């Protein structure tokens, strides 16, 4: 893809490379957030999953978090303990079923996250200001189908960890 003034059709490889670049920059942003807060990358991923569950109105349980992150119960407990000690997560017991444990992000941690991610959202909004509704629909569909393709191909790799060399 060159900027010669001529309209050139973007190839699948061009789009793949642009998506890879976005993914790398997104990872770097999340790593900087984690480093700023003394969090491992898995901790940041856990917070993102807990927040996404809360937005859906379905609080994340430790068991569901372990499944999503593909961690053992003991590793998940250590992760939650670490996040709780840093003030990023609270264990709560939902009314109606005191046996269940739900993971919630306290307001102070949400505010800290806002300081990092609201400026990013504002920068995105500014960058996307020139897109009309139809273009936004195309971008949203592109991102949805690309995410699903990545999930499908990633699932083919399985969950057993790296293959041993022989």
Image: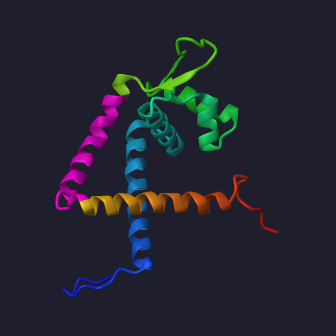
Q: Is residue 72 left or right of residue 113?
A: right
Left or right: 91, with 111 as reference point: right
Estimate the x, y position of residue 59 in percent, counting from the top left.
50, 27
The quarter holding residue 132 reads: bottom left
Q: Residue at x 67, y 61 (%)?
A: 156
Query: Is 125 covered by the magenta stretch?
Result: yes
Lateral position of residue 51 relative to residue 166, left or right? left
Q: Residue at x 54, y 61 (%)?
A: 150
Name the quadrant of the N terminus: bottom left
Q: Residue at x 60, y 11 (%)?
A: 98
Q: Is residue 68 above or below residue 99?
A: below
> Could you say where residue 119 lies in the image, as x and y percent from the top left?
24, 45
Taking the spot 58% from the left edge, 20% from the top edge, the residue there is: 101
Q: Which residues are magenta?
A: 110-133
Number of labels in the image equals 0
Query: Which of the image's four quarters has the C terminus?
Result: bottom right
């Amino acid at each position: 893809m060159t900027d010669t003034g001529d309209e050139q059709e973007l190839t699948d490889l061009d789009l793949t490379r642009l998506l890879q670049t976005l993914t790398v920059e997104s990872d770097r942003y999340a790593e900087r957030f984690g480093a700023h807060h003394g969090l491992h990358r898995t901790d940041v991923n856990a917070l993102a999953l807990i927040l996404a569950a809360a937005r859906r109105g379905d609080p994340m349980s430790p068991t569901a978090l372990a499944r999503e992150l593909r961690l053992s119960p003991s590793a998940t407990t250590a992760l939650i303990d670490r996040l709780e000690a840093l003030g990023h997560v609270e264990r709560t017991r939902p009314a109606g079923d005191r046996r269940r444990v739900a993971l919630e992000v306290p307001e102070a941690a949400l505010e800290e996250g806002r300081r990092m991610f609201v400026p990013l959202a504002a920068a995105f909004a500014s960058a996307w200001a020139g897109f009309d509704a139809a273009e936004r629909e195309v971008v949203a569909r592109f991102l949805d189908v690309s995410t699903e393709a990545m999930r499908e191909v990633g699932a083919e790799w399985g969950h057993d960890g790296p293959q041993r060399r022989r």
